Amino acid sequence: MRQVALCAFSAFSLAACSGGSTSSAGVDPGGVYVGTVSIAGNSYSVLGIIDESGLASLVEETGTTPTSIVAPYSPIATAPDGSFSASGAVYGINGALFEDGSSMESTTVAGVVVPRSSIKGTTTDAAGNVGSFTLDYQASAYQSPSSLSMIEGDYTSSYSSGGTTVNMTLSISSSGSISGSDTAGCTYSGYVSVPNPSYNAYNTFLINSCLSNGPEIGLATYSSSEGENPATLVSLGHDASDGYYTSFTKSD
């Protein structure tokens, strides 16, 4: 895996999602974004979620395989002209390691937010490589209401561990509490909250009994069922050392 600093895209906190708010003098970075980052001769696709307070989380993909989560250390704060700079981290997904053997790398980013349109800028990785990124705002994905009653229900997902597929089952209650388990014997607890009911972004906090790196914090976005396509909840998060990308399918 490359050593790359993608924190900018999420400069939306993207993952490291500690509390905070954007400067009252700045512009609003909130949204669901898709785009690309180019660095050290390589190009990667990204998906990012930023809530209205500037909390952000972003996943980087090589082809169709998620490889890392990017998250600034604090919510992004912009200047009146939309410019910002941030420091953060890139987390290898599910224990994946970077070239130096670590699962987490530092990163810095600088750019400009055009509200409800785009985020563009440069990013510098731990090795000093400088790259560029462009993120485009997805109005249809973000500008829809959110609520705990909407996402209440049972969900399934799966992930690979040591070459074995592990199946997960989670339940979200009407109050947002999470409970669940998987076929590896792990249990899950936590909660989902709604930062702003006008937009499709959720804050997440999840504890896995099998992990000792602290809780997974992040952001999620919900897609209602449409035709034969079931409802899904996509979560982007990280704990103290690793990143997690999970797409949960809602049971009927």
Image (cartoon, rainbow, N blue to C red):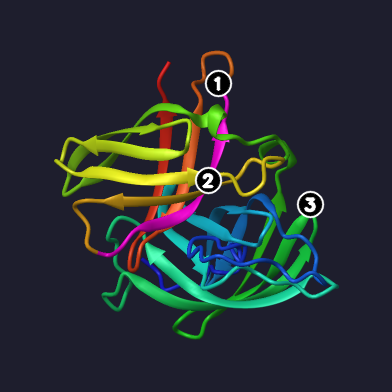
Q: Quadrant of residue 153?
A: top left
Q: Is residue 64 visible to the viewer in this orientation of the structure?
A: no
Q: CA distance from mark 1 to mark 2?
A: 21 Å
Q: CA distance from mark 3 to mark 2?
A: 23 Å
Camera-side residue of 46 and 55: 55
On the picture, is 14 further left or further right than 139? Answer: left
Vertical side of 251 occupied by 195: above or below: below
Camera-side residue of 234 and 77: 77
Residue, disc 1: 225
Q: Which one is in front in this view, the residue at disc 1 or the one at disc 2?
A: 2
Residue, disc 2: 193
On the picture, is 68 further left or further right than 135? Answer: left
Residue 223 sits inside the magenta stretch:
yes
Q: Which one is in front in this view, the residue at disc 3 or the one at disc 2?
A: 2
Q: Position of residue 162 (x, y in %)?
A: 16, 49
Vertical side of 204 occupied by 22: above or below: below
Q: Position of residue 3 (x, y in %)?
A: 41, 74
Residue, disc 3: 116
Q: Main secondary structure of the magenta part?
A: strand
What is the span of residues highlighted in magenta in the rendered image?
213-224
Q: Are marks 1 and 2 in contact (CB under 8 Å)?
A: no
